[in-house]
Image (cartoon, rainbow, N blue to C red):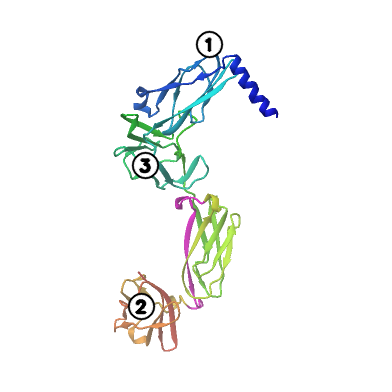
Amino acid sequence: MLKSAGILFILIHCLTQKCAAIDIYFTIDVDTSTWRNTCHPRIEVSDLSNVDVGDSIISRTWDFGDGYVVEGDNNMQHSYFRNGYFKVKLKIITSSGVKDSLIKQIFFSGPNPEYNVRLFEVSKDSFLMCYGDTVVIDIVKNKPTIEAEYRILWGDNWYKFDPPFVHVYEKTGVYYPVLEMTDETLIGDVTIRCRAYFPDTSHHYGLSPNLKAINVQESPRIEITANPTLADINTPVSLSVTGQIAADSLVWNFDDGFILTSSNVDTFVIHQYKIPGIYNVIITGKYADNKMPSLNCLAVDSIKITVVRDLVDIEDFATHQICVLPNPFISTFRLVGVSPSRVEHVRLYNIFGVELPIIFNQNLEINTFNLIDGMYYLEVSGINWSSKKIVFKH
């Protein structure tokens, strides 16, 4: 009943008095002179709306469709800082309380590439790399009017035209690369060639995604030591690490299938090998998953440990005044200092204790051309004597 009474009142009011009305209309003009150097088009909007005699406009609200809303005059200027479709809306309120609005859509094409930076991301604003790292910027997607032109300014006085964009910084520091793109853009029926820069720091609406600061640091250095480096299977090996340990933890790879992870303050470990051989122990800094840096930012070092079955008499050639020349050898070595008549057996074993076939002549020259590079155990014996020595083939 109240609703019907309200409608009846409006009808009676409009019959007895002239109802206020708005003939809302506005124009959009594009200023192309601002486009060529920045790819930022500027428009001018003009309100040409009409209201009834005796009524007046008391409020104009312009919504430019890019997040910028302002109450202004009948003539306004506005610049856009990205391309795409935008809905420009004018809302008017008159002194009699009449409200109305009108929406027009405009479109700006132009440079708007999508790209990514292949580098460790340390935060939303920067990347972390170490000296010697390579930064790669990929142009992922772009729809230019014609073939676009690109240039990367790396922030260290170097620049590169056209992909692929690959760079190595020669000094430590923080750098701010900029991607420059030149392309044609369409404004209505007019084609204009313009240049854009990414990131766009001239306005808070900036283009996305932005290039970020690149923080180039010194590569961390660590050093691993071992005692002893020549041990038998009954002797434990003590290992320690010193240097710049910025990692969250340390990973010890003992090269025998055993891997140990310790905290970054546990820099001393003991390990015992059960099988003879040459082991390459590697220590690596481990970082949390959310901040895994590049390989050059990893602190890595290694050391070789030689493990033999028995060290009791392995280096006793000096007792019998025998020399092996050369050692390391390439394919042939010779026993010096012992008469061939004193030698009854010459045997060569691999690190697993397996005897290997060798050829030696009356001058005690031993030919090992068929053996691979590595460490071997040489045993020379005669009547009531025997000597052993480690020899290496490279």
Q: Position of residue 325 (x, y in %)?
A: 34, 73
Marked residue nearer the N-terminal end (2 or 1):
1
Horizontal placement of 274 versus 168: left or right? Answer: right
Q: Nearer the viewer, residue 360 or 154?
A: 154
| Nearest to viewer (mark 2 / mark 1) | 1
Q: Residues within 10 Å of mark 3 (few under 14, many from 20)?
A: some
- The image shows a total of numbered marks equal to 3
Q: Position of residue 28 (x, y in %)?
A: 41, 23
Residue 53's tag is: 1
The magenta region covers 292-313
For the question of whether residue 200 can be seen, the reply is no
Residue 299 within the magenta-colored segment of the rendering: yes
Horizontal placement of 169 versus 24: left or right? Answer: left
The image shows residue 361, relative to residue 256, as above or below, that is below
Instruction: Report the Cα–Cα distance between label 2 and label 1.
Output: 127 Å
Marked residue nearer the N-terminal end (2 or 3):
3
Q: Residues within 10 Å of mark 2 (few under 14, many from 20)?
A: few
Q: Position of residue 365 (x, y in %)?
A: 30, 79
Q: What is the three-letter code of the residue carrying label 3?
A: Asn
- The image quadrant that residue 81 belongs to is top left
Q: Disc 1 on helix, strand or loop?
A: loop
For the question of whether residue 72 can be seen, the reply is yes
Give the residue at x 44% y 36%: 176
Q: What is the three-letter code of the residue carrying label 1?
A: Val
Identify residue for label 2: 337
Give the residue at x 33% y 45%: 164
Instruction: Report the Cα–Cα distance between label 1 and label 3.
Output: 53 Å
Instruction: Report the Cα–Cα distance between label 2 and label 3.
Output: 78 Å
Q: Position of residue 86 (x, y in %)?
A: 45, 31
Give the residue at x 70% y 28%: 2
Identify residue for label 3: 142
Q: Residues within 10 Å of mark 1 (few under 14, many from 20)?
A: few
